Image (spheres, rainbow, N blue to C red):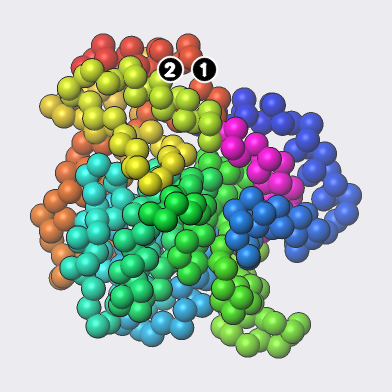
Amino acid sequence: MVDLQSQYKKIKNEVNAGIQDVIDSTSFIKGGKVVDFQRNLETYLNVKHVIPVGNGTDALQIALMALGLQPGDEVITPTFTFIATAEVVALLGLTPVVVDVDFDTFNISIDSLRKAITPKTKAIVPVHLFGQNADMEEILAIAKEHNLFVVEDACQSIGSVYTFKDGHREQSGCMGDIGCTSFFPSKNLGCFGDGGAIFTNNDELAAKMRAISNHGMVVRYYHDFVGINSRLDSIQAAVLDVKLKHLDTYSKNRQTAADFYNTAFAENENIITPKISANSTHVFHQYTLKLQNVNRAELIKFLADKDIPAMIYYPVPLHLQKAYQDARYKAGDFPIAEKLCGCVMSLPMHTELTEEQLLYITKSVLEFI
Ligand SMILES: *Cc1c(COP(=O)(O)O)cnc(C)c1O
């Protein structure tokens, strides 16, 4: 699904030198490399504060911890996403409220979102799934109307750009009160272990989240908040600082691969290719097809026999996950997400796909269908 080895080979000297610098400095935690990367990412995103943390899940947790929410407060998330989005809501004793998604974009449905708002709703966590921004103009308007926080889950969408109706453009994760991303190795900007970051333009929230990520400490050994230990280490920052310079090229390579797939599948009525929204670029964390009248399991097996990986992101929506069973929800409540779980299939998508590989993959898919 990804080819981190070929990607590494192209930047090996630079990355190895960066890692060696950290080892020579022995400044492993909160070292200069972390600050360098933080500054460079702030510039890239055009955001006031980047707070590097241990991983994307922690980023989401710290964001929610900083909002001063009370047990029982409701946080709305789409039901079609990776589990981490709702996991942190549940862990903090908040109430996850799930809503349906849009069939075309896989992102949070604005209608479903509106219907889910109650007097207890305090925050919305839209997920920019597969690398394309959710409809932030509408989400921000709803949040403003109901006085809600917006925490963007931008774990799959770093580098994607959203254009508002007035023409101004913002980077994914930098539109709501807080944005969260992950640097898990297979993410669009991935390190060599776990890593993540929080984005905000709000000085007060930034100071609080920085403290929470470091045991709630503002002055050393004086703890103003209940915090956690979640820091990006310097070796990961050294890797990320090199890869950040290539992020736009990486996104372009993904888009080129997506174009190839789109063209190959355009005429086939059993395959629905990803829809690109008018107001967002797509950085294709995943390239996800919707299959119609195709035996998906057989297709995946057919591809596997030809050494082509294909994955189902995601097979089960949040409201039907065992750990999240809840009297409020049952099968059939979110028909679009449930339908998507039954028909999506993601093909290999990364920065190193060659035309030869793409041709082999598309021919094989079409051969089966
Ligand atoms: C990867 C991911 C996360 C979690 O990030 P980790 O760094 O693995 O903790 C959260 N949300 C979404 C949508 C993700 O894809």
> Vertically, is 66 above or below 330?
below
Q: Report whether 37 appears left or right of 355.
A: right
Image coordinates for residue 236, horizontal then vertical, percent: 69, 50
Asked if the residue at tag 2 contacts the one at tag 1, i.e. Cβ–Cβ closer than 8 Å, the answer is yes
Q: Which residue is labeled 2 in the image?
A: 358
- Label 2: state its secondary structure: helix
**At 81% across and 58% down in the image, what residue appears?**
32
**At 56% across and 62% down in the image, what residue appears?**
199
Snapshot quadrant of residue 189 = top right
Q: Report whether 269 appears left or right of 85.
A: left
* Badge 2 density bin: few <14, some 14–19, many ≥20, Cα 10 Å: some
> What kind of residue is marked 2?
Leu
- Label 1: state its secondary structure: loop
Residue 354, labelled with which disc? 1
- Real-space Cα separation, disc 1 to disc 2, in angstroms: 6 Å
Snapshot quadrant of residue 291 = top left
What type of secondary structure mainly makes up the magenta span?
Answer: helix
> Vertically, is 60 above or below 236?
below
Q: Which residues are magenta?
A: 232-250
Image coordinates for residue 229, horizontal then vertical, percent: 62, 70
> Vertically, is 191 above or below 78?
above
Asked if residue 212 shows in the view, the reply is: no
Image coordinates for residue 124, horizontal then vertical, percent: 35, 68
* Ligand 1 within 8 angstroms of badge 1 C-beta: no
> Vertically, is 57 above or below 351?
below
